[in-house]
Structure formats: structure tokens, C-alpha cells
Image: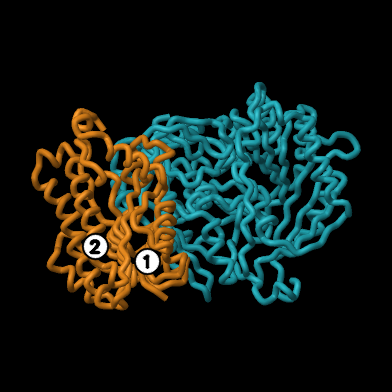
Amino acid sequence: MKKYIGNWGNYPVMECNEESFVFDEQLDALIKEQQPFIPRGNGRCYGDASLSQRIISTLKYDKILSFGRQNGIFECQSGITLDQVLTVIVPAGWFLPVTPGTKFITVGGALGSDVHGKNHHVDGSISNHVIDFDLLLASGEMTTVSRENNPDLFGATLGGMGLTGVITRVKFRLKKIETALIRQKQIKAASLQELIGLFDEYKDYTYSVAWIDCLKKGKHFGRSILMLGEHAKLEEIAESDRNEPLNLPKKKQIVFPFNLPSWVLNSFTVKAFNLLYYTKNFKKEINNIVSYEPFFYPLDAVLHWNRMYGKSGFVQYQFVLPLTAKEGLIEILHRIADEGLGSFLAVLKVFGKQDSMISFPKEGYTLALDFPVRKGLLNFLDELDELVLKYHGRLYMSKDARMKPAMLVAGYPELEKFKQIIKKYNPDGKIRSAQSDRLLLTAGN
Amino acid sequence: METVLILGATSDIGIAIAQKFAAEKYNIQLAARRPVLLEPTQSDIKIRYNVDCTIHAFDALQYHTHSLFFENLTPKPDITISIFGIMDEEDDAFENWNLTQRMIDTNYTGAVSVLNIAAKFYIKRKKGTIIGISSVAGDRGRASKLIYGSSKAAFNAYLSGLRNKCFDDNVHVMTVKPGFVYTRMTENMKLPALLTATPRHVGEVVFEGFEKRKNVIYVKWFWRYIMLIIKNIPEFQFKKMKL
């Protein structure tokens, strides 16, 4: 049945035919049909990466296949969400090796985007923790892929936006924890310079990320809060919690009930929010023990928070610049502050080294910003693209809804190799998305 | 810990009911014609809910195997839930006797065959619960659900008779009429959101009805009233309608 589907940014929205499967043989039958398709998990990429006229949803394919409570090896079908994985592994003393800022993504989606988290500078992206996975190719052939046995398919699938095939089974390594709590440190920085210094000073922390107020001009330009964390050890938590240190946090969920009219978010309200956010931390530094949920998933507490941006949706813009391009970061932030287009969230993170074909992370500074869709936004983002290129940066395909093919070519040195692999395993463009068509990644373009 | 037998465990509703009972700490026995399909569900239930879960081959149409199938279950289930059933295109079935017979034999004869065996066991033990997932389509015969509806009408009558028969022996029988459900089978149909349940919701309602020892439940409450109206339309009028 045709329905209108958009991903997390609600931009773009497309008329799609969505089909699902529970058993392998049902997926086999769906793949054999002529019409091209794109696999889709929980639709938390922001743009059009998992949109196509025909979508094969993995959400009903969500079974856990094995869980080594001693060795921390977890094996599951690709449609299970990280949220469901956490409810099983945390009470057993394990955690996700890498998690993005939402737990409402599927494991298959995590591989397709090769997601990174606040620990990228220490643990890399999810690809570093994947042992192997099964991939159903466009031809209908099932193949088991690991970094060792098929580096080409491994490299092109991790971060490859689903274009190599449908990921069905995934086996990955978990991280041992003593408690479900995080020892957190928050430090206020008055400027971008100070923040960058702090990132360096605290680089031994496993988890680090900063929220920047990017509308602040003048003396306080770049004022921000650096958030650092470690999984709390048993002896670090309150005595009252030590009997059941691995209890899951209680569910406190708020639902954003409707799409906010788009005039509500203007530069005034965003400034007010940022002011509140910044000043809620009275002290220069806060040290406390918190549950893993508010630390890793602050926005998941509000279901459908994307409705805040109204019906016309929003675009998230995430780029990475090399470590040497600090002035680029400053220039881009100035450009955004001058434009006043209202980024509600600006998240800065320092990436460590990464060795992969098409994954987004590379060593440097990554900044993610939300922009409500307004007249003039797309032109403005094209201007930002030029700045990103000038400083040898690149954009994250999982967030993208609008970049031009040349931008991808310039940012990803191994793109040609990626395209060759797609051509080999998906020769007729049977697996394709609105994004892969736009970025000229699939056959027939 | 009590054990639940799920007959027809490969359906979306079967999986959802199994998951709900497992979450409530019941051991699970999954039965279906092709048990190999159940392996991922089995591991999933064991790992997520820390309960025991076994898989069993069961073919509703092979009546002569049903006794042995039930005999081989260890432990014996405390609750037996029958979910299996087929719904072919009615126009095809009307033209093709084999399809008609297969629907009747699965939805009615097969269910009676296996539930008689469970009922006899529970009556002897003076304890047990039988839950039959039937359909609102059995509430009144209609052209658009000619064979399916009549097979479910017969199943409804069987369940209410069984409830009556077993009452003195402390065996409870519950009839469930789900209405529309979002499953893989219906994903290409346009269903009215207010009248359509998710499989997970069916699982929750079945468990709640089981705990409260309900007799007949509709999954979405307004189905009870819709069917009440449909049942009360005079036949001379009803026969002219297209429902």
C-alpha cells in the first residue's frame, strides 16, 4: 500500500510502498520481485538515504540469535533496535561498544551508516566491533561478510547506506560494564578556543561531546558545555545502588504531541533556549553520577521531538574537518551565527583516526547542526558546502538530504572504489534510494 | 512456572502472544508446521525473557498425529492457545473445492481435533486453560467471507460449547475475536486505524483476558458493538447488503 514516508528530518517526504518480512524466505521472495527497493530500519537517518518508491522494512526481523553472557558476543537479526538490545544486555553487565545519540535505530541501520558515538576517539565507529554479518545481495545470493574474508564488501557495506544488499544477521562485540551508570563531568567553556583546549586536555575520557551555542556573537562566540563521561565503577556509585547496579533506568517518556507551527522556532526562541541551557549549569564544572539514558540519549526522552521543527521538517548538517582546520570551524560557525537561520542543536566532537572506505568519520572536528526547512536554506547550505570543501572536510550521508554529487566526490577519496563495488554486487541498481539516485551512486544514472 | 503451548506460532499474532506470555514469565512451547522457521523466535524468547522455550512440529491437517503430538509435550502445557488458520481469497475458494475444504479442515476440523485432546487432558487434571483465536467474521455469515466466516462461526460455536462442557471441571475456555490486525498479510490493505490492532496489542489483550478469565473478548472494544449491530440487522435486509 502506498503511503507517505519521511525519515527523521521529515524532509523529504515520498510516496512509498512498504513491505516487511519475518522469515528469511519471505525476504528472498521480496528480493526476487522486479521493482527496485531500498532496505529501511527505523527511519532515523535524517534525509532520503532510506527512501525509495519501494521500501523493504526490516522492523519485523528483530530476533536475538545468541548472547554470550560471559564473552559479550551478541548476534541478532538486523531489524532489532538498540533500545531493545540495551534492555537485554545492560542487566547482564554489557553495553553497546558504540552508540549514536539515539537508541531508536536498528542494528542494520547502525552498520549501514557505520555509526559513531561520543567514544569515537577511543573506540572508533561500530565497524571496529563487528565480527561478521550476513548480507543478501541483489542477486538473491546470501553471503557472510567479515573484514577478513571480504574486505571489499565489508568496507562498502559499513557506511554504504544499504546499497550493497540487505544486512540480515549481525554478530558484534559488546563492552563490559560494572554499573548502568555514568560518571559524568560537565565543563562550561566561554569560547570556542577554550573548548578546543578542553577537548585536548580531557582526551583520555572515553566519552566526550560538546553542545555549542552557535548564535552567540562577539566576546562569547562559541560558548559551550563539554560533556565527559566514563562508565561508573561499582565503588564509585552510591552505596544504596550497589545491590542492583545494573538495573535499567525507569521509563520516563514524554511525547511531543504535534507538529509545532514553523514560526515558533525563530532566532529569538532559539537564543532563549540556548541561554537557558547554558546557564542551567551555574558552576564552571559539574561532576555527578547519572543513568546512561540522559547521558547518551538526552533527546530520546521526548518521543517525536522532530515535530518541534514543524511540518516542513528540518535538515541536519554534519561535517568533519581535519584537526588542522580549526580556523575553518570558526569561519563556519561565524557564517551560521551571521545568517541567524536558527540551529537549535550544535554538537561538536573530536574524531580519532578511522580507516574505512566510505564511512563518515575521519580524524578531526565534527559539527552537527539542525536547520528548519525555510526559504533560502538550501542555498545557504550550498554555501556552507563550499566552506567545508575549502577546509578539506566532508558531509555525513546519514544526515544528508540535499548535497550535490560533486560534494561527495570531493569529500570521499575512495568513492570510486565504493562505486565499483556497488556496480559489482548491485549491477542493475536493483537496490537504490532517492539519495543514491541523487548522488549518482547506483546504475542508470 | 507454568507453560503455554502456542499452536500456529509462525504468525505475527502467534509470535506476539508468545512474547507477551514469556515476558510474564511463562515457559513457551512453539508449534507450527515448519518448526525450522521458529528457531530465531525460540532463541529470542529464551534470551530476552529468561524462560524456557521449545519448538515442535504440528500440522493442523494431520489429525491422526495430534494425539502423539500432545503426548510428546513435556511438560504438558497449562495453557493451550490455538492461533492457526488460513484465509484464502473467497472467490477462488468458491470455485475450487480443494481450497474450500482446506480452509474448513484447518480452521475448524484441525482446531477441534487438537483442542479436544487438550480438553480431555485438562478435564482429567481438573485444571487448564484453552484459548481459541477466532474471528469477528464468524459472528454472521457474509458473502465476502463466505467460507472463512463459516469456518470461524463453527469454531466459535465449538469454543462456547467447550466452555460449557468444561466448566464443572475447572477448565476455562476463552474465545478471542481480533478484528483487523496489522500483520504481514494485511500490509497491502488499507485498514481503518481505529479498528485495527497491532499484533503486540493482541498479545496484551489476550494475556489480560486470560488473567481475568474472560469468556469472549474482542481486541478493540468497538468491534463488540459493530458486530452487535451487524448481528441484529434483519435477514430480509441483510441478504441485500454488501458487507
Q: CA distance from mark 1 to mark 2?
A: 31 Å
Chain label for disc 2: B
Q: In the rendered view, would you say B103 is above or below A388?
A: below
Residue contact at pointers 1 and 2, CB within 8 angstroms: no
Q: Secondary structure at mark 2?
A: helix
Q: Do the residues marked 1 and 2 share a common chain?
A: yes
Q: Nearer the viewer, residue B27 or A110?
A: B27
Q: Which chain is orange?
A: B
Residue drawn 50% across and 63% down? A172
Q: In the rendered view, would you say B113 is above or below B241?
A: below
Amino acid under label 2?
A: Leu
Query: For chain A, what colour was chosen?
Result: cyan
Residue drawn 84% across and 43% down? A223
Residue drawn 65% across and 66% down? A180
Q: Decide if residue A319 is on the left or right side of residue B175.
A: right
Residue located beneath label 2 in the image: B162
Residue located beneath label 1 in the image: B42
Which numbered circle lies on residue B243? none
Amino acid under label 1?
A: Gln
Percent of width and height locating residue A66: 44, 67
Quadrant of the snapshot with the N terminus of chain A: top left
Return the residue found at the far right: A219
Q: In the rendered view, would you say A331 is above or below B173?
A: above
- Judged by depth in the image, the label closer to the viewer, 1 or 2, is 2
Chain label for disc 1: B
